[in-house]
Image (spheres, rainbow, N blue to C red):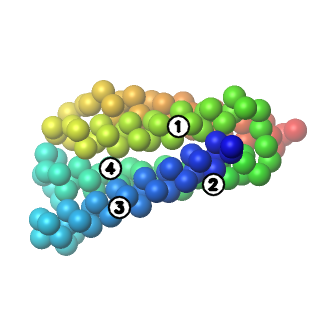
Amino acid sequence: MNLYLICAGVLVIFFFAISLNVSRLRVRHNVLIGSDDFTHPLTKAVRAQANAAEYVPVLVAIFLYLSIIGTAAWVAWIAVIVTLARLLHCAGMYLSPDLNKPHPLRLAGALLTYLGGLALGILLLARALM
């Protein structure tokens, strides 16, 4: 079982699912572009999708590279943690009553994404310097 490919697949499916949800909400609320009410479901969906768009492509690229070169099993668990972090962050965006106020799932998701991303970056640099 290749955890990197599983994580990449989960992130890709996740991204397209939340993107589809933005389109669904735009039709439902008759809003073609933009959103500015930080309590509105459309705004939450747009912000969650935009945030995922910032991280998912980079993470998928790293996961695919690590899958090809092979790594220690513990490294794959960083990918699992980062994948779960992205899902937590998104859940925090959707569950937050107001995006202008902090939500514990958003905080946990962001923190784990940053820490995991830094660890993956360090691993890539270490690999390059070998």
Report how far apart the C-alphas of labels 4 and 3 lie in the structure.
9 Å
Q: How many marks?
A: 4
Label 2 near label 3: C-beta < 8 Å? Answer: no
Please tell me how crowded label 3 is: few (under 14), some (14-19), or many (20+) other residues with Cα within 10 Å: some
Which of the two discs, 2 and 4, labels the residue nearer the N terminus? 4
Please tell me how crowded label 1 is: few (under 14), some (14-19), or many (20+) other residues with Cα within 10 Å: many
Q: Quadrant of residue 97?
A: top left
Q: Position of residue 1 (x, y in %)?
A: 69, 43
Horizontal arrangement in the rendering, residue 10 relative to residue 24 (left or right): right
Provide the residue designation for mark 2. 61
Label 1 near label 4: C-beta < 8 Å? Answer: no
Provide the residue designation for mark 4. 48
Mark 3 falls on what kind of element?
Answer: helix
Residue at the spot 77% in from the left edge and 38% down from the top edge: 71
Please tell me how crowded label 4 is: few (under 14), some (14-19), or many (20+) other residues with Cα within 10 Å: many
Which of the two discs, 3 and 2, labels the residue nearer the N terminus? 3
Mark 2 falls on what kind of element?
Answer: helix
Provide the residue designation for mark 1. 82
Horizontal arrangement in the rendering, residue 130 relative to residue 12 (left or right): right
Residue at the spot 30% in from the left edge and 37% down from the top edge: 92
**Three-letter code for the amino acid on which mark 1 is drawn:** Val
**Three-letter code for the amino acid on which mark 3 is drawn:** Ser
Q: Position of residue 52 (x, y in %)?
A: 42, 51
Residue at the spot 19% in from the left edge and 66% down from the top edge: 26
Horizontal arrangement in the rendering, residue 17 relative to residue 68 (left or right): left
Horizontal arrangement in the rendering, residue 56 relative to residue 70 (left or right): left
Residue at the spot 13% in from the left edge and 51% down from the top edge: 40
Label 3 near label 1: C-beta < 8 Å? Answer: no
Give the mark toward the camera: 4 or 3: 3
Provide the residue designation for mark 3. 19
Q: Position of residue 63 (x, y in %)?
A: 64, 48
